[in-house]
Amino acid sequence: MKFDVVTIFPAMVESALKEGVVGRARQAGLLDIVVHNLRDFTTDRHHVVDDVAFGGGPGMVLKPEPLFAAAEAIAERRGAADAVLLMSPAGTPFTQAAARRLATLQHIVILCGRYEGIDERVREHVATEEVSIGDYVLSGGELPALVVVDAVSRLIAGVVGDEQSVEADSFTRGLLDHPHYTRPAEFRGHRVPDVLLSGHHGEIRKWRQREALRRTAARRPELLAEAGLAAEEREFLESEGFNPATEGEGFSPAGKKGSR
Ligand code: 9D3
C-alpha cells in the first residue's frame, strides 16, 4: 500500500513513521510511504506557503498553489491516488470503520493543514474527503495524518506480526478490551485473578468476555448498541445491574458510576 503525506513539517512526520510497527513494515516493503515538504512545491524565492485571508481576520491561510502542485507531482511520480485526504477539524470523524474502508485502497495522499485554515479550492478540487480525528483543537494535521497512517496500516496483511492480535482487536467486535496481567502473580499485595492462573481455557475465555462487556457497559455504553450482543450477554449485563437502553444506547450504567 502507498501513502504520500504532504506537510510543512516533514521531519516530524518522518520521525514517527520510522518507528514501531509502521517503521518495520516500511523496511519490509509492505508499506511505501513518502513524506513531502510542502515548501518544495513553492516557486517563489522564500518558499512561502501561507497568506492573509481575503476579507480580513486573524491568522494565515495555506495558499492553494503549493498544494495543487504537490498533488499533481505525486500523481505524476507515484500514480493517481485512490483518495486524497485533507486533515481538518471540520472533517468527518475518523473511526475504525473508516480505517477499514481506507485499507481496501492502494494509494492514499494525505494533506496536512496548518494555520487558521486552507484555501477552500484545495478542499473542492484536490481533496476527495476531509477527515478529523476528534473534537479537540490541535496545531495542525500532522498528528492526525500519523493516526490515519497507523490505523490503516495495521489492517494491511503482514504489517502487524501477529494476525491473531489484529483479529482479536477490541474494536473488531466493537467492545472495549478485557484487563491484562503478566508476572508476578502477586505484586505489592495485588493479586492476579485466580481464573487466569487456573489453566482452564474455557473459564478464561468466559471471564475475559464478561470483563469486556462489564467495562464497555460502564465506560462506553453507547458501543453496546452496535456490538450485536447475544441474549446471554444481555442477561449477564442485566444481572450485573446494567439496564437495557431506552434510546439506542444499548445499555446504560445504573448505579455503576465509579465502579471504575
Ligand atoms: C477557529 C477555528 N479553528 C477550527 C476549530 C481553526 C483551526 C484549529 C486547528 C484550524 C486548524 C487547526 C489545526 N488542526 C488540524 O489541522 C486538524 C485537526 C484538529 O485540530 N483536531 C482533530 N482533527 C484534526 S485533523 C486536522
Image (cartoon, grey):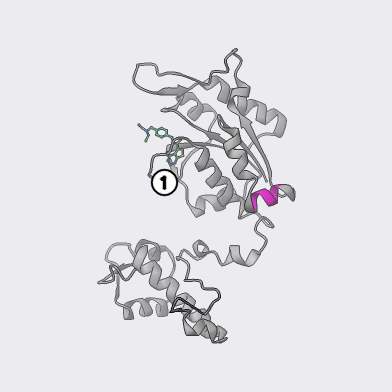
Which residue is labeled 1 in the image?
A: 134
The quarter of the picture where residue 257 lies is bottom left
Does mark 1 have its CB less than 8 Å from ligand 1?
yes
- Number of numbered discs on residues: 1
Q: Secondary structure at mark 1?
A: loop
Magenta portion: prevailing SS class: helix
Vertical arrangement, residue 96 with respect to residue 189, above or below: above
**Image quadrant for the C terminus?**
bottom left
Where is residue 34 drawn, in percent x and y?
Answer: 67, 37
Image coordinates for residue 233, horizontal then vertical, percent: 41, 77
Residue 37 lies in the magenta stretch? no
Q: Is residue 104 left or right of residue 50?
A: right
The residue under the point 57% across, 37% down is 12
- The structure residue drawn at horizontal position 46% and vertical position 81%, both measured from the top left corner, is 193
Q: Position of residue 182 (x, y in %)?
A: 55, 73
Q: Is residue 32 left or right of residue 112?
A: right
Residue at horizontal 49 percent and vertical 84 percent from the top? 195
Residue 22 part of the magenta-drawn span: yes
Magenta stretch in the rendered image: 21-26
